[in-house]
Amino acid sequence: EKDGYEHFMMKEMYEEPKVIRDTINPRIKDGELVLDNVTITEEDISKLEKIYIVACGTAYHAGVIGKYIIEKLCRIPVEVDVASEFRYRDPLVSDKNMTIIISQSGETLDTLFALRESKKRGARILSIVNVVGSSIARDSDDVLYTWAGPEIAVASTKAYNTQLTALYMVALELGLKKGTITKEEADAILGQLKQIPNDIEKILENKEDIQKFAHQHYNAKSIFFIGRGLDYALSLEGSLKLKEISYIHSEAYAGGELKHGTIALIEKGTLVVCPMTQDNLFDKMVSNIREVKARGAVVLAITQEKHAEELKKTADTVITIPDVDSLVAPISAVTPLQLFAYYMALEKGCDVDKPRNLAKSVTVE
Ligand code: F6R
């Protein structure tokens, strides 16, 4: 059932183009975005003072991207929290809020209880879930399914890409209904989303570049991920994926924050991974790369083809993704980070699909 792939994780990364298409295409009818099972009205949206996004692990990292996107397109404040913190902190949730719950399995206990806590306090619940009829789906007012299909590898890959895709569609729906974006703007973003699967196909075709890099660096003891804006959110996910399956210590830092924290840990040979897909923050990141290079870091940057030549002057290795608008870039830019984690784990001889001590679905506290 691995269809000839060595691991489920690789098979599932190869499914990303298809499952993103499956998540988008059925929801475009005659050029209009139609979110099945989402019945929130213009009136409901106009009453929203704030949106909470609550999830665990990789789904939480999708939520961090969701915050940026919803705030940008809908101009509603968004707070994103991990479920195990949210449910116990007496959250300020009421009927003036909506809680967006994200979960691949739909069964994560902390996430389910965060949902119930939110509901009890009067919030409307919209969930982004992969498993049809799961507990989280059943308890929600609105459900937007990610059509990622079964995910077997413990480390989540394709589910994350589809969670992002779904979050962009939610942001478009809310923005259109609230009037903070025009139909033309929404159409343009939808057009970009539809291009992403082709981009991921190209990224997968070029996976050997990442494999080669991993082959040279798998002995790293500690790896930093730094990024700004959406690339910071991506850094969180890239770092988690690496830790989960390769057991290499890693930390994600906002690019501008490193010098307020652990830049002292960057020494000769320390590997620093920099997703750099945000055009308006590109120069700031180049400065951050110079800072870490001055301390001896080896820098792997991931960026659009259009930036590659320039970036090669600063970073040691540049992995490219096809040119894509900064707003939607995370959906394809995460794939090289997933591949990086995969090849590092493989080089180290780790059990890629079943990392130690982790369960696919955490139904206990
Ligand atoms: C990471 C991973 C976990 C899950 C988390 C939430 O690769 O798989 O961090 O993302 O346990 O699980 P779901 O999405 O099923 O609620």
Image: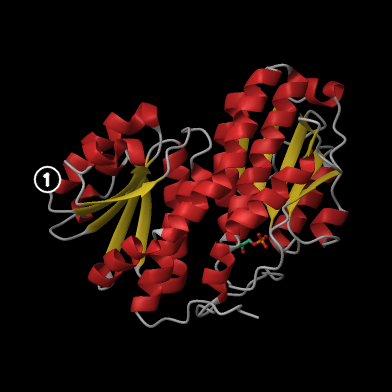
Residue 305 falls in which quadrant of the image? top left
**Residue 113 to residue 27: above or below:** below
**Residue 103 to residue 73: above or below:** below
Is 165 positioned to the left or the right of 241 in the image?
right
Residue 193 falls in which quadrant of the image? top right
Q: Residue at x 68, y 44 (%)?
A: 166
Residue 119 pos. (x, y %): 83, 44
Q: Residue at x 61, y 26 (%)?
A: 188
How is the rendered protein coloured?
secondary structure
**Residue 104 to residue 54: above or below:** below
Q: Residue at x 86, y 52 (%)?
A: 139
Q: Residue at x 15, y 57 (%)?
A: 267
Is 111 positioned to the left or the right of 341 in the image?
right
Reading the image, the residue beneath label 1 is: 294
Residue 31 in view in this figure = yes
Residue sitting nearer the eye, 179 or 32: 32
Name the quarter where the C terminus is drawn: bottom right
Is 110 positioned to the left or the right of 66 in the image?
right
- Label 1 sits on a secondary structure element that is helix
Residue 14 pos. (x, y %): 55, 63
Residue 83 in view in this figure = no
Q: Amino acid at mark 1?
A: Ala
Residue 123 pos. (x, y %): 81, 37
Residue 239 falls in which quadrant of the image? bottom left
